[in-house]
Image (cartoon, rainbow, N blue to C red):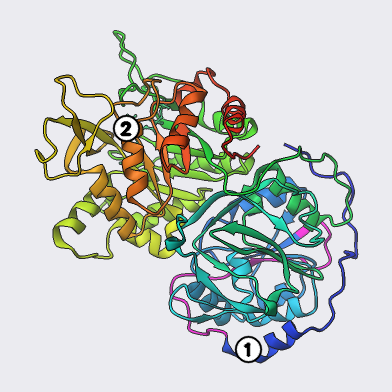
Amino acid sequence: MEAPPIVSPTKTLPFRSASPSSSLLFRRKHRLNCCRRPSRSFTVRASSAAGDDSVVTLLDYGAGNVRSVRNAIRRLGFQVKDVQTPKDILNADRLIFPGVGAFAAAMDVLSKNGMAEALCEYIEKDQPFLGICLGLQLLFESSEEKGQVSGLGLIPGVVGRFDSSNGVRVPHIGWNALQIREDSLILDDVGTHHVYFVHSYRAMPSDDNKEWVSSTCNYGDNFIASVRRGNVHAVQFHPEKSGDVGLSILRRFLYPNSPLEKKPTEGKGSKLAKRVIACLDVRTNDKGDLVVTKGDQYDVREHTKENEVRELGKPVELAGQYYTDGADEVSFLNITGFRDFPLGDLPMLQVLRYASENVFVPLTVGGGIRDFTDATGRHYSSLEVASEYFRCGADKISIGSDAVYAAEEYLRTGVKSGKSSLEQISRVYGNQAVVVSIDPCRVYVKNQNDVKFKTIRVTNPGPNGEEYAWYQCTVSGGREGRPIGAYELAKAVEELGAGEILLNCIDCDGQGKGFDIDLVKLISDAVTIPVIASSGAGGVEHFSEVFMKTNASAALAAGIFHRKEVPIHSVKEHLLKEGIEVRI
Ligand code: 1PR
């Protein structure tokens, strides 16, 4: 990790000055169209500092994980100070707006609190501004996210959904390369490196907004990856989750005059990279300490007289190590969450908080996300559980058992109740924030029609020569088989709002013999959301195999990384050698 620059921040930031433009006139014309319905779900929090060079104003309306942005700002030597009123925006020396959640909800809250007007005025004055993700989209005229909703109207254009009929998986999740169109100042050090995107909606470049566009990204189409006009910048990707390159982008915004201390090594990015994910199965050991464990086919106990939980390290340390080693994401799975209440598991929340201080790639957390009533009778909704995970630093949450019950119910009734954890969390945080973790077991059958579930012809016949198998979903950490197949589950949870599938395989877990290619192919061909292949990685060739033979977007491993048998950089070097694009 690079240290913050030693160059002190300048008093007057020497950004390019903006001249009144057709776009600003456009904005004045459209400004009153801003959506003004009051928000029910969010309250505005903003951070501000007037005249203090070491403080960044942060506009946070409380809809998701802004913790990583705060951590990144702090890492770069700045403080974040919360303020409450639109005036704080107008008085800011530099403003970062990390938009999260849904477009309409964000516009509601910004309009209701007078923040929309203040933002427009601040930007119109060409004050230093950096919008992130939704913070870019809101600058546009409108969005089609929930019907047609007006935005701030600063930039001509409509934000629309990626079209999965183009053959791309939606959401667009992962590390993609940029085509940088002009000197965009903050992107000067990016070159061909990948940056991290996670979104389903995007703005398209056009003649009307071409003065704004500073970079595009190709995903099916060329969409707008960043805009710049004078001191006003906005990026569709997440610099705070884009590793060293992302931190250098933030540094360029915060210290526009500073020379680059350490040039990032040259990358070779041209499109969406395949991701390599490190997974930490976490639980308390018999002494009550939270440890990283790892099972064989989900059995995490040592086969000794004491039968103790297998320990492979400390969660925060290992997460930091994997970030430094080049993991594209880190996942924590609280593997006993199905029986313990996660909000009662304060060490787990603390692990997340600490990990997010040092890990600037996406963090996923799973385990125990469901409705829960504690011993005192207090009811917690799954949304509250997820919200707490997000507040503590998670970028995505992963649902296991509860998604199985939701899919069963949906397939039985044909009705989306809207009440399942999956539906509720994806409605509030967006489907890109919701992963469904599947724990299937292979069940061999003699004939294709022996079961009502989707069967496939397996590459390696079963113990009695069976040529077919189906993959039975399980709950409670593999302890209970359910009457639903992985294929049926994957399709159902996609419809219910999952943004990604973490596809484990109990048969392969911890075996080191490679991913279950039949299973990964089955599921990654069945859905249009990204699929993470998991379970069974034993060597670098298993990663190239899964990417060459299936449509998996990412591959996850645990044991080989924990036991230091295969370093993450070796996996990436191998994939590059095989012609598979990865982030380096
Ligand atoms: O059901 O919502 O509470 O979620 C529980 C979560 O915990 C699920 O995501 C489930 O997969 C996970 N889990 C439950 N029990 C276990 C266990 O191992 N006893 N771990 C468990 C699942 C599987 C992978 C593993 C890969 C790679 N671990 O995540 O890391 O198989 O391992 P490998 O590379 O060593 O082969 P809920």
Crowd band around label 2 with a 10 angstrom C-alpha radius: few (<14), some (14–19), many (20+): many
**Residue at the location (55% across, 45% down)?**
362
Label 1: which secondary element: helix
Task: Identify which amino acid the numbered label 2 is placed on.
Answer: Cys
User: To which quarter of the image does residue 355 belong?
Assistant: top right
Does the magenta stretch mainly form a helix, a strand or a loop? loop
Q: Nearer the viewer, residue 478 or 21?
A: 21
Q: Is residue 474 left or right of residue 121?
A: left
**Residue at the location (57% across, 48% down)?**
272
Q: Earlier in the sequence, mark 1 or mark 2?
A: 1
Estimate the x, y position of residue 459 in percent, counting from the top left: 28, 28
Question: Quadrant of the image for the N terminus?
Answer: top right
Crowd band around label 1 with a 10 angstrom C-alpha radius: few (<14), some (14–19), many (20+): some
User: To which quarter of the image does residue 159 belong?
Assistant: bottom right
Give the residue pinned by disc 1: 30
Estimate the x, y position of residue 342 in percent, counting from the top left: 37, 43
Residue 551 visible in the shown view: yes
Estimate the x, y position of residue 356 in percent, counting from the top left: 58, 43
Task: Identify which amino acid the numbered label 1 is placed on.
Answer: His
Is residue 528 within the magenta segment?
no
Give the residue pinned by disc 2: 505
Q: Nearer the viewer, residue 468 or 135?
A: 468
**Please, is residue 74 above or below residue 295 in the view?**
below
**Please, is residue 40 above or below residue 311 in the view?**
below
Estimate the x, y position of residue 491 in percent, counting from the top left: 29, 53
What range of the chain is rendered magenta?
34-55
Is residue 49 within the magenta segment?
yes
